[in-house]
Image: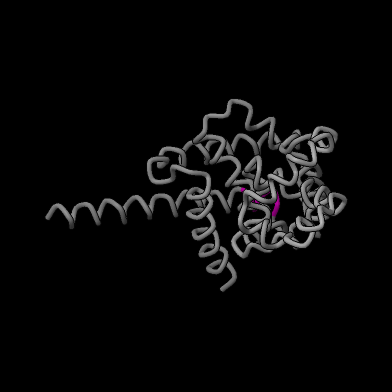
């Protein structure tokens, strides 16, 4: 009986989360109907910041100061850059030739794109490149970083009703943050959202 109740509660909670995410997708679609690739990053960033109780999350989304200032990243020492690539098994394997040859020109170029996502764990950027991170396709991230981020910024900056989008995102984030006991880490938050959003988008396209 206890197990049955627990299973029922879990299913009820899952359905509640799915409903909130579905409402979130519908809400964002009012502002960005064609930019479906932004639904997951925006929801993910809002929820992660809400759970972590970042007071300035709204400013972060629209100021675009979501990763280290390039000038600050540029002054990182060679040792720091090398350590960044060596401490992550996936990066170490992908960039083994550059690491072996200590090709800092190439490593630093990749560092500028990968450090904000993997080092700083920026929730918007890590969701924007979620598929590549899952596939450990780090070179694709480096190749597409500037173009994809620039496109995202342009899409959102072009909005006339950003305050309304923010208010809605805040409301959605607070609702989803109430389930934070099930979504403790940033990774788990993104995994839950990614799966639900994928299901919702497939349903939408049927």
Quadrant of the frame with the N terminus: bottom left
- Between 187 and 194, the one lying in front of the other is 187
Q: Is residue 147 above or below residue 54?
A: below
Q: Is residue 5 left or right of residue 191?
A: left
**Dominant secondary-structure state across the stretch colored magenta:** helix
Coordinates of residue 61 in the picture (x, y in percent): 69, 37
Coordinates of residue 29 in the picture (x, y in percent): 64, 53
Coordinates of residue 198 in the picture (x, y in percent): 55, 63
Residue at the limit of the structure toward the right, as seen here = 105
Residue 17 highlighted magenta (yes or no): no
Q: Is residue 135 above or below residue 119?
A: below
Identify the residue at horizontal 72%, vertical 61% (top origin).
96
Identify the residue at horizontal 73%, vertical 39% (top origin).
80
Q: Is residue 154 left or right of residue 197?
A: right
- Between 71 and 47, the one lying in front of the other is 71
Coordinates of residue 181 in the picture (x, y in percent): 38, 41
Identify the residue at horizontal 77%, vertical 48% (top origin).
111
Q: Which residues are magenta?
A: 28-32
Identify the residue at horizontal 81%, vertical 57% (top origin).
101
Q: Is residue 178 above or below residue 104?
A: above
Q: Is residue 44 above or below residue 11?
A: above
């Amino acid at each position: 009986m206890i197990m049955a109740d627990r299973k029922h509660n879990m299913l009820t909670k899952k359905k509640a989360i799915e409903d909130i995410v579905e409402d979130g997708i519908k809400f964002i679609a009012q502002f960005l109907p064609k930019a479906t690739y932004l639904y997951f990053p925006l929801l993910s960033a809002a929820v992660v910041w809400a759970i972590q109780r970042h007071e300035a999350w709204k400013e972060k989304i629209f100021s675009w100061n979501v990763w280290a200032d390039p000038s600050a990243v540029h002054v990182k020492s060679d040792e720091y850059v090398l350590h960044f690539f060596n401490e992550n098994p996936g990066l170490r394997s992908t960039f083994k030739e550059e690491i072996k040859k200590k090709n800092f020109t190439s490593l630093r170029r990749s560092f500028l794109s990968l450090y904000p996502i993997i080092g700083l764990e920026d929730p918007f950027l890590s969701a924007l490149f979620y598929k590549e991170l899952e596939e450990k396709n780090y070179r694709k991230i480096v190749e597409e970083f500037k173009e994809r981020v620039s496109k995202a910024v342009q899409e959102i900056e072009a909005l006339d009703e950003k305050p309304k989008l923010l208010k809605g995102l805040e409301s959605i984030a607070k609702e989803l943050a109430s389930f934070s006991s099930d979504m403790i880490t940033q990774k788990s938050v993104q995994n839950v959202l990614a799966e639900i959003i994928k299901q919702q988008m497939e349903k939408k396209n049927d």
